[in-house]
C-alpha cells in the first residue's frame, strides 16, 4: 500500500537517533521481562558453597528461591540492568545501524559479512558501557547477597576491589558477546529476509527470527558465559581459589578441574530459555519503536 511505512529504507539522516531510542526502549523491555530467568541462570552457574544454593533445574530453582527467599529475590538487581540497559542498547543499535549503513548494508541483497561486522562493532561499544552494571547485577543476584541497592553495591565493590572489578570480565564478555551478537544479527537478518522478503513491518517474522537467533547464539556461547559469571561474582565467594580467579583461561581451568566438560554448560537451559523469548521481544520492540517513532 502507498501509505505504508517503509521502515527499512527511511532516510539515513534521521536514522541514528531513531535507532538509538528504539534500541534503548527494546533493551529495557527485554531485560525487565526476562530478569527472573536471568537470576536463575546466574545461580546455576555459580559454584555454590552451601547445599541451599544448589539447583537441579529451572523449576527447582524457581520453587526453592521463591519459597525460601520470596519472589522479590528473583528480581534483585533488576535496577542495575535498567540503569545500564537503556544507554547500552541505544549505543548498541545506533552503532549497528551506523556501521551497517557505512558499509553499504542498505544496498540490497544478502550481505551477511556486513551485518556480522556491524553486529560485532555494536557489541564492543555497548559492552564497554554495560559491563559494570552487569557485574553489580550478578553480585546482587547470587544466593545470600549482601546488596539490596545498586549504588551501595557499586561503592562497596569499588572500595574493596577497585575499578578493575568492574572490568575483569570485559575481555571474556567481548569474547562471548562478539560471536554471540554476530551470530544473532546474522541469523536474524537471514531468517527475517526469508520470512519477510518484502521488508515490511511484520511482527510474526520479527518474533520468529529473533527467537531463533537468540537460541542459536545463546547455546554456542554458554561456556564463555560460565567463565564470565565466575569472574563477575568472584568477590562474593568464600572459596579462596574462586576469589583469586584472574581471567578467562583461569576460569576455564577451574571449571574443568571441578566439574569437567558438563561444567561449561551450567545454566545453558535457562540461558537459552531467557534469550529466545527475550530476543524475540527485543527485536519485536525494536522494529515497532522504529516505526512508531518515525510516525
Image (spheres, rainbow, N blue to C red):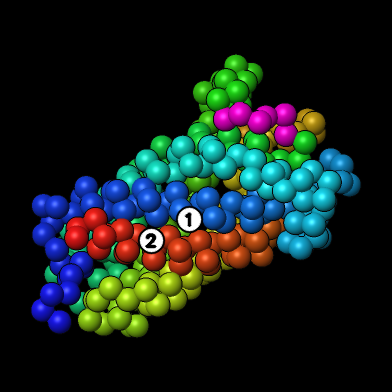
The location of residue 180, given as percent across then percent down, is 46, 59
Secondary structure of residue under mark 2: helix
Q: Name which residue lies at 60% across and 65% down.
A: 273
For this orientation, the residue located farthest to the top is 159
Q: Name which residue lies at 72% across and 48% down.
A: 71
Q: Nearer the viewer, residue 25 or 181?
A: 25
For this orientation, the residue located farthest to the right is 51
52 to the left or right of 89? right
78 to the left or right of 210? right
Label 1 crowd bin: few (<14), some (14–19), many (20+), radius 10 Å: many
- Disc 1 target residue: 30
Query: Does the magenta stretch mainly form a helix, a strand or a loop?
Result: loop
The location of residue 194, given as percent across then percent down, is 33, 83
The location of residue 24, given as percent across then percent down, is 36, 48
* Residue 115: quadrant of the picture: bottom left
Q: CA distance from mark 2 to mark 1?
A: 8 Å
201 to the left or right of 179? left
User: Which quadrant is home to the C terminus?
Assistant: bottom left
> Taking 195 as reference, is 249 above or below it?
above
Label 2 crowd bin: few (<14), some (14–19), many (20+), radius 10 Å: many
Residue 185: give its label.
none
Secondary structure of residue under mark 1: helix
Start-end of magenta stretch:
145-150
- Disc 2 target residue: 285
Q: Nearer the viewer, residue 285 or 219?
A: 285
> Disc 2 vs disc 1: Cβ atoms closer than 8 Å?
yes
User: Which quadrant is home to the N terminus?
Assistant: bottom left
Amino acid at each position: 500500500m502507498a501509505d505504508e511505512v517503509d521502515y527499512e529504507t527511511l532516510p539515513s539522516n534521521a536514522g541514528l537517533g531513531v535507532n538509538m531510542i528504539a534500541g534503548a526502549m527494546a533493551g529495557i523491555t527485554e531485560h525487565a521481562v526476562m530478569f527472573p530467568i536471568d537470576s536463575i541462570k546466574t545461580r546455576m552457574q555459580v559454584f555454590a558453597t552451601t547445599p541451599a544454593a544448589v539447583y537441579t533445574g529451572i523449576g527447582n530453582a524457581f520453587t526453592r528461591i521463591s519459597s525460601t527467599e520470596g519472589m522479590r529475590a528473583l528480581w534483585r538487581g533488576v535496577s542495575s540492568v535498567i540503569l545500564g540497559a537503556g544507554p547500552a542498547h541505544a549505543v548498541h543499535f545506533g552503532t549497528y545501524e551506523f556501521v551497517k549503513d557505512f558499509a553499504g548494508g542498505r544496498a540490497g541483497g544478502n550481505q551477511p559479512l556486513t551485518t556480522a561486522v556491524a553486529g560485532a562493532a555494536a557489541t564492543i561499544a555497548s559492552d564497554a558501557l554495560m559491563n559494570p552494571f552487569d557485574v553489580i547485577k550478578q553480585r546482587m543476584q547470587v544466593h545470600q547477597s549482601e546488596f539490596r541497592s545498586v549504588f551501595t553495591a557499586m561503592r562497596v565493590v569499588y572500595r574493596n576491589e577497585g575499578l578493575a572489578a568492574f572490568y575483569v570480565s570485559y575481555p571474556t564478555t567481548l569474547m562471548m558477546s562478539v560471536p554471540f551478537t554476530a551470530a544473532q544479527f546474522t541469523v536474524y537478518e537471514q531468517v527475517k529476509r526469508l520470512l519477510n522478503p518484502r521488508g515490511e513491518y511484520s511482527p510474526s517474522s520479527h518474533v520468529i527470527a529473533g527467537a531463533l537467533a537468540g537460541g542459536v547464539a545463546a547455546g554456542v556461547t554458554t561456556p564463555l558465559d560460565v567463565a564470565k559469571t565466575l569472574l563477575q561474582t568472584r568477590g562474593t565467594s568464600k572459596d579462596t581459589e574462586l576469589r583469586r580467579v584472574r581471567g578467562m583461561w583461569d576460569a576455564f581451568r577451574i571449571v574443568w578441574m571441578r566439574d569437567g566438560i558438563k561444567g561449561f554448560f551450567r545454566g545453558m537451559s535457562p540461558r537459552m530459555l531467557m534469550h529466545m523469548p527475550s530476543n524475540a521481544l527485543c527485536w519485536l520492540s525494536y522494529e515497532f519503536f522504529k516505526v512508531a517513532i518515525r510516525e
